[in-house]
Each structure stands twice: as C-alpha cells, then as structure tokens.
Image: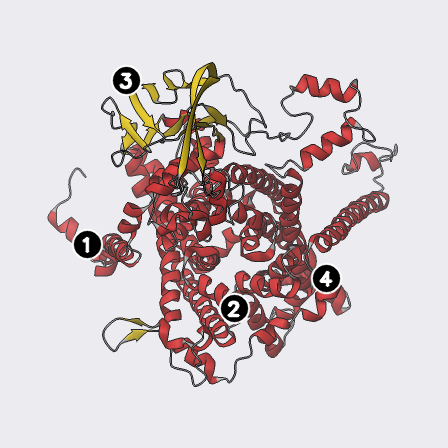
Amino acid sequence: MTSTDIHSPLAYTGGDGRYDIDRHYCDLRRQRRLYTFIGVGAILVALFFSLWFANETNAGKFFDRLPHFFDFVGDLMPRDGWEVWRALFDLSSPYYDGSFKYDYPDGRVYITVSLFVPEYFYKMIETLNIALLSTAIGFTFGFLLCFLAATNITTSRWLRFFVRRFMEFLRAFPEIVIAGFFLAIFSLGPVPAIIAVAIHTIGALGKMFFEVVENADMRPDEGLRAVGANWFERVWFGIVPQVMPNFLSYGLLRLEINVRASTIIGAVGAGGIGEVLRLSISRGHEAKTLAIIVLLFSTIVCVDQLSAWLRKKIVGNQAFEFGA
Amino acid sequence: MASLAREDIETIRARNPEVFYRPFWKRFAAPIALGVCVLYTIYCFWFFSIGKVFVEGNWNIAGDYLADWVSYEVRPDIDYRTGEIKVEWPRFSPLGDDPEPYWLDTERGLVTVVTETAAAPAAPSNDPGTDSIMAPDTPAADVPVTGQNVLESAGAAGFSFMSPNSAATSAGTSAAGSAQIQTTTETREGINRVVARISAGSEMIVTPDLVIVSHQGAAIEVAVDPQTNTVTPLTPLPPPWALQKTEGAKVFLDFGFAGRAEIRAKETKIYKRYLGWENFVFDTRSPYWGKSFGEVAMLLIFGPRLEEGRSNWAILADNIINNADWQHGDVWIKLLQTIVMAFVGTLFACLVAFPLSFLAARNITPNRIVNQVLKRFFDFLRSVDMLIWALFFTRAFGPGPLAGISAIFFTDTGTFGKLYAEALENIDDKQREGVRSVGAHPAQVQRYGVVPQVLPVFASQALYFWESNTRSATIIGAVGAGGIGLKLWEAMRTGQDWENVAYMVLLILIVVFLFDGISNMLRSRLIGRRAT
C-alpha cells in the first residue's frame, strides 16, 4: 500500500494527474473483503467455542438429548381433546380421581354464589393487571424523569448525567433480584412482580422518552420562552403536546413486553399465570398445561394486535422510525 | 391593532371552528385519562390488596437483608451456663477457626463451675447446631437463621419464600432433661469476664451472672440465671434499642448497623456487623488467608512452596476459584453461560430469520400464501412466550445453557422474522429495478439491490436484541434454563447469601453495561448517530 489513507483519491493520483480509479476500487474491495473475512471468522470462532462451552456445561449433552427435543409435544397430549376446554373453563372432568391432575372445578373463583371466573382466566387477569399497573407506574415516573435527562430541556450537565445513569441503572438491574428481594419481604404474591417490572419499566421508558424529547421541535419552546413562560410551562405547553403520541406509542410497546415479563416473573414465584404454568408443566398435567398455553397465547396475540392498532391510530407509521 | 373588536373575534371563530369548538373527548382528554388512571390504580390497590401487603411486609428483615449486601456478621456466643464463660464461634466463622478479634477481650479469674451430671444420658444440647435437624435445607445451619427476626416474624409465612424449611426457629433453649440431676460445685480458674466493644459508644460486659450494656449514653444491667433460666433487667430498659418481650425471657439489644445482641439465660449471642465482603479473595482454609497484598506477592515470587508438588501460583488460582464463600469459579462459569445463551441464541435466530424474511416480505416474494404462512409462523414463535419455550427445553436438555439457547432462538426467530420482513417491505424499490434492468439474475437482484439497503438495519436490530437478550437470559435462567439466573435464585432463596447476590448483580451490571456500550457503538457505526 502506497498511502496511509486508502479512502483518499489523491493517493491514487499519479504524477501526471490521472486518477487510477480501477486500482483504487480494487484496493478498497480487497480491504473490505479482508474486514468481512476477519469479522465472520471471529464470529465463527466465538460461536464454535460458545457451542462447545454450552454443551460441556449443560446437564444433558446436545446429541444425546436431541431425540428428546420434541418430547414436550408428548407432554401436551391430553386424554381427549375436550379435556383442554374443561381445564380452561373449570368444568368437572370424567377422569377425576381425586388427584390434582383433573381437579379443574377446585380452582374456580366465585364472584357470586353461582357465577365464577375460571382459575386460569383469573390468573391471566392478574398477570395482565401486573403488566398494566407496572407500565402505568413506569410511564408516570419515566415521564417525570425524561425531561431532566434531555439535552434540550435541562441545561445542567450534572443533573442530566445523574438522571441518565440512574435510568440506565434501573434498566440494567436484574428484575429477578428485585422480585426475589421483595418476595422475601412481602411473602408470595404479585406485589413483588409489580415492583420489579415497574422499576425496569421506569428505566426503559425513561431512556426512550428522553430520546424522543431530544428530537422534538424546539420552535414552540422558543415561542413560549419569548412570552416569558417558566420551565414547567415550556415543557407542558411546548414539548409535551408534540411528544405525547410517541410516548403513548412507546408505552403501548412496553405494555406488550411487560405482559411477557410479568408472566416470566410470575413463574419464579410472584403469582399470576406464569406460576401455574410452571407448576403444571413440572407436575405433568397435560390438559392444564395446554389450556394455559392456549390462554396465554391468545392473550398475547390480542394484546399485541390491540397495541399495534392503537399505536397506528396514535402515531401512524411514524412509530417505526424510532424503533429501528 | 391594539385590541380585538367583538366582530373580529367572531370572524376568527367562524374561520377556525375546529380550534374553538373541539369535541368533548378532545377537550377533556387529559383529565379523563388521568381520572381513568386514578380509578384503575384504586382498583389495583383493591385487587392486589397492596395496602395490606405493605403493612404486613417484614420491613425489619428488609433492613437486615439490605445491610447484608455490603456487610457481614460475626456471631460469637458467650456461654455461661456452667458458671465459667466460654466464647464459642460458629463453625464457618468469617474470622477463621479460632479468632481473637480486637473488640472482644476476655479476662481470667476465679469461677464457680456448676457441673450437672444427669442420671439419664440424654443430655439436652443447647448447641445451636441442633437446629439443623429442623432446617435441613439451610446451609451452614449452625448459624441460627437471624434469630431475632425469625421470632418476630413467626406466623408471617412469607419470610422464607420457596423454602419453608429454613423458617425453623432457633428456639434452642430447651429445658434440661427431667431426669435426676446431681449438681457439683467447684471453684477454679477460668474466664469470668468478657468485654465486647460493639462500636465506639456501645459496650457489653458479660460476667456469668450479670450483663452490663452501655449504649447511646445509657447503661443497663441485666441479671442472668442459668439455673432458673431467667433473664431479669435490673434497670429499666430504654425501649428503642433494648427490648424484653415477656418477663424472664431473653432481652434483645439493637445497636443499629454495628450489630445486635440477645441476652439469654444461659448465653449471650452477639451479632457484630462488619462493613465489606468477607474473605472475598481467599476463604479461611486458604494458606493465603489473612495476608496482605504485599505478603501474598512475596510468597508468590520469593516464598517457599506452601505445599509439596504444587507451585504457589497454582494454589493461589485454585484457592480463588474454589473460594467456599464466594464460589468465584462457579459464578464466572454461570455468567459465561448466560452470555453464551444470549450470543448463540441471537446469532442463530438472526441467521435463520434472514432467509425466511425474504420469503415473508410481500414485495420480494409475490406469493400471498407463502407470505401469510410465514408471517403467522413468526407470530406464533413470538407469542408462545420465551418462558414457555424455556420450560419445555429445560425438560428436553436438562438445566443448562442449551435450554436457554433454544428458548431465545425460537422466540427471536419470530421477532427477527417479523422485524426483518417489515424492513424489507419498506425498502426503496429503485435500486432493485436498476440491478434488474442490467440483466441480473434474481438472486443477484437480492444481493446487490436489497441486501446493501437492509443489512445495516438488520445488524443493528440483531445487536440491540443481543444486548436485551443478555438481560432476558438472566431471568430465563431462574426458571431452570441455567446460567447466572439460577445461581442468583438459589442464593436468594436461602435468604442468607445476599452478599453473593450483590456480587452477581455487580457482575451482571458490568456485563450489561459493557454490551450496551459495544452494541451502541457498533449500531451507530452501522446506521449513523440517529439510531443510538
């Protein structure tokens, strides 16, 4: 290589002032191929060692266990197809033998003497409520914090720095530890899950919110500043109206994520549908497992569709510009 | 114009009716939304009975647990049941096997020893170690499970979530056996006074029949009688820090962060708290334990071999990795498992979703049925939660990273497929047209007309999910897929290893921040500043 800067055409310009474009192109292509080769090679090496390591430290070896890969399909075969509906709607089963496996009516949650909510629907509502409440809490606090982290709103460098690091900390702190800690204090129940998911949501939403605020149009703010508005008035009348649709859109996106998150947190002992699912799988109750999966699946699909529809109504197709 | 006339206002109003006569829902959108939120919060308070949960929470435990994150307790028992004082340390005391800490002084003198010889050999043991019979699940069961709190929270079932066995109380002061007891009294030399300086202003002086405590400028005297098994305060107990629940029973002392103590009839238990992580590098069995950095370095470089057949460096590595309290080696392996789970799962999902997304995008593959089938398949993979996949694959592969890899792979294939297909449908068609117009093969059209447009976006999304999956992998681990999540969960359910939890959280935070930084850097290089 004759030059230090491969990108500069000057390096390929000879003494007669002719630019050797072909040679430059070849060199650039060669360099690019080299980088691609090195990058792919590094990823492959990392992948190879990762796979070897994963296989070594796993309880069962990959190739020994591969025939059992779809064992779970066998775990999902109920005695007959109607069992799933009986499990789902807590109807009594003809196979009832006193065991937990077929005790569907025992889980009924009675509202009045005769009207009841089937157990899994009740648990699903609980999980949905965990997700909704924690999203609402996260939204509120994220909303309050994000303006303090945005460069165009908050001039104090230190405040901004502190708020941003704080939100990153909340986002990165493992939810499972928060849940575990509050489970120790509050005993089993959904409140630890709410706290854990909400804390994470504050960090995650706060980060997205302040990026939206930084992209906001500052002309309304300038106008308000010109008529002597104070900080709160500028934020409330100048920034909030233009960022609110995006905030709502992100909040809905977060709600989708939180429904899944609260299911998972539930599985480690914080109540809701996740816990009954884990118990049911580990006890080998096929019909119950399948009923829960059907319910969970349809709920997630519904929430996703509803949220996508609402987001489209609120921000149109603009939402994806930020998401990418 | 200085001011508006009435007709001017009317004309403006007529010209812009939508500004002045907004529909009801639009006008009051904010208050209505706020009202709905408030109502919903009230409903949730009722639904989850949040108030009740907060009131019934074991908040005193919370303080102890939080303190455990950054500190540890040393728990000597000062036993005076025979008339002679014995200072006993639990088996795995952080101070080593036979500690003589600077804050605990023993004085020798004449003691009157009362020996009880029971006719029946069923000697009742007051050793706290007997608790372990009741709490087989509790590791290091010879350390009573934070006795005071257990007693106070008796009945509150939630104290030890998921491991009811560890709630066994440490009420080990069983009465002496009922058989005839012959008592012999003997006077000899022994320890008759122990002075424990808990903190600068707090001190305990323990003698076989009297315990004197001074704290916050107040001093109290408590008489103890092992024979009648009673504890009698001679001075009134100042309530915030000294407490006796029932007459004759043990006295609880609270010295704040510095520690606490229990004065019982036969022994005084002291829980002195140190700031820091105990024996973080070497445990007490290590030959390097208690040595300063300089001493260890000297031993490594110049010192004689500590052990035949092994170099000092090998011993050092072995002692650090197999540290009994911190299990560094195991923690690092588990952390690596979590990282590997996220990396391999995301990479495979990316590789599989890449070709599939071309088939799913309606502008690339003009086949409605294939598009729809693939898109619904992606939705299915995504909507069957990562939790469900993780639970199933834990059954297939056993706990370990393979289950986590599979779970992340299945979920993210769906996510990537959907995102990639959407990105492909939004591409600029002109480049494809151009490549096609010069007579390129359909495969070449994709390669040169489509891939250069979408590859940065694809890679950016993959990087984003790589970072976010590192966090998900932690949670997935706790339900059985292995990795650091499972280790965290095991450390938490014992309720005693919060310092280990803190250590693992710190490692996770470092990894997440590191990956976040790398991912952000690469993404901003790929698609420019805007996406960071």
Q: Are marks 2 and 4 in contact (CB under 8 Å)?
A: no
Q: CA–CA distance between discs 3 and 1?
A: 78 Å
Kind of residue indicated by mark 2: Arg
Between circles 2 and 3, the one closer to the viewer is 3
As measured in the structure, the alpha-carbon distance from the residue carrying label 2 to the one carrying label 4 is: 24 Å
Q: Is residue B335 placed above or below A85 in the rendered structure?
A: above
Q: Residue at x 70, y 62 (%)?
A: B434
The mark closer to the camera, 3 or 1, is 3
Check disc 3 and give the amino acid type: Ala
Mark closer to the observer (2, 4): 2
- Could one spot residue A151 in this view of the protein? no
Q: What x and y, as percent, mark residue A1?
A: 87, 35
Which colour scheme appears in the figure? secondary structure
| Residue receiving disc 1 | B13
| Cα distance between the residues tagged 1 and 2 | 70 Å
Residue A34 showing in the rendered view: yes
Q: Are marks 4 and 3 on the same chain?
A: no
Residue A62 - label: 4
Quadrant of the rendered structure where residue B199 is? Answer: top left
